[in-house]
Image (tube, coloured by chain):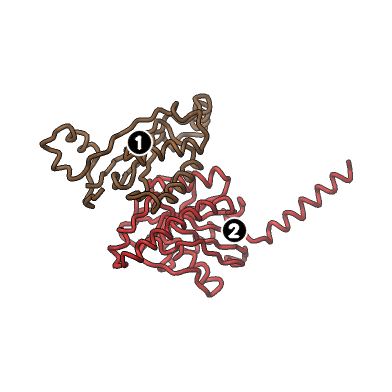
Amino acid sequence: MVVKVFKNFFKRIFSNLFKNKREIKLGFYGPPNAGKTSLANRICKDFTGEEMGTVSKVPHETRKVQFKEKVEIAYKGKKMTFKMIDTPGIATKIDYEDFLKYKVSKKDAKERAKEATQGVIESIKWLDDMDMVVVVLDATENPYNQVNITIIGNLVARKIPVLIVANKVDLKKADIKKIEAAFPEYEVVGISAKFGDNLEEFYESIFRVSKKV
Amino acid sequence: MNKKRGSGKKIGDISQKTSSSANSSRLGQIKGFSIQFLPYSEIKDLDSDDRIKKILGILLGNNILILQGRITPNEEARLIGDTMAMIGHIANFRGIELAVISGNSRDSILGKMKKGIANALAGGDFSAITVMGPATIVKEIKRNPKKIELFLNR
């Protein structure tokens, strides 16, 4: 009996030590063109000097899950190591004709649509593997989009800590209050991934939410 | 279906005008679909696979589906995944539009508990309504906490 108590005590101490040193799998989820890759790039550039992926005005630019391992985020004397996972935007419909208005050829548009559908499937599959997720929303768009609600609902069902980022606050149409009203139970941080606005608050929130992992 | 991509038309306008043949030309090419209401009892006893199969079957038949209640977030994600797998394999299928309108998300903890117990006893969230439609017919579903607006392709 005494041996068992000691065993459990040491097990708990060692697992806690290990937990603090391990890499936290940090996913970036959201609808297409919300700025997931821009934000992931910004973080990677700040702490590793390298970017994660390409960004574009054409929706579904990220069509495969992208990783960056061992990204050590240091903020106000605290350090944490993350495996960053940038996922393709989740959508309920993909029409190749929508890409034609961005002067993409018909052949490329069809190929892009095909890859984008696979990307959505891949993003959904990866939900189970995340330790923590940043849901990136475009602050100029209606937050009551069902894709946002479905993503957050799935994270809650899996007990994965969530931080909501209202991106593109540099734009006039941005409305963080609307996002806060739509998701009153979550912490919402307004940022501009493009210009690096308010990233201090974002890093602070990341550290706060990561305590729930 | 060769539809013109227009600015969209509210479903409220459409339902008033579909009965009039004189007005049908004004509706462009919106024809050949129906609105189907599905009581939750129809899917209550099905497993997730069969629920999704049933819903997709209705949507692929060019129907707008109004479902009493809602499916689980996990089923919603699977529905999106299955939808994506079908694009490119089924002619003219470009995905779906989907929206759920449910009770007040600002309920107190006690209110949420009460709702949770009521849902568990009833076997589903009957206070919600789910609207879905194939993207070839439904251009957009705009929702805010209190209403859903359905815009159709013309």
Q: Is residue A202 left or right of residue B68?
A: right
Give residue A198's quadrant in the image. Answer: bottom left
Q: Position of residue B97 (x, y in %)?
A: 35, 45
Q: Position of residue B136 (x, y in %)?
A: 30, 47
- Judging by the rendered image, the residue that carries numbered circle 1 is B65
Residue lying furthest top in this view?
B121
Q: Secondary structure at mark 2?
A: strand
Q: Position of residue B21 (x, y in %)?
A: 13, 35
Which chain's colour is red? A
- Judging by the rendered image, the residue that carries numbered circle 2 is A25
Which chain's colour is brown? B
Give residue A18's quadrant in the image. Answer: bottom right
Distance from Cα at disc 2 to Cα at disc 1: 38 Å
Residue occupying image coordinates x 50% and y 58%:
A28
Cβ atoms at labels 2 and 1 below 8 Å apart: no
Q: Amino acid at mark 1?
A: Leu
Q: Nearer the viewer, residue B65 or A141?
A: B65
Is B70 situated above or below A199? above
| Residue at mark 2: chain | A
Q: Nearer the viewer, residue B119 or B151?
A: B151
| Residue at mark 1: chain | B
Q: Establish whether labels 2 and 1 are both on one chain.
A: no
Q: Is residue A199 left or right of residue A107?
A: right
Q: Position of residue B4 (x, y in %)?
A: 21, 51
Q: Secondary structure at mark 1?
A: strand
Residue occupying image coordinates x 58% and y 65%:
A76
The 10 Å Cα crowd at callout 1, few under 14, some 14 to 19, many 20 or more, is many
Q: Is residue B144 left or right of residue B27?
A: right
Q: Amino acid at mark 2?
A: Lys
Is B108 situated above or below A100? above
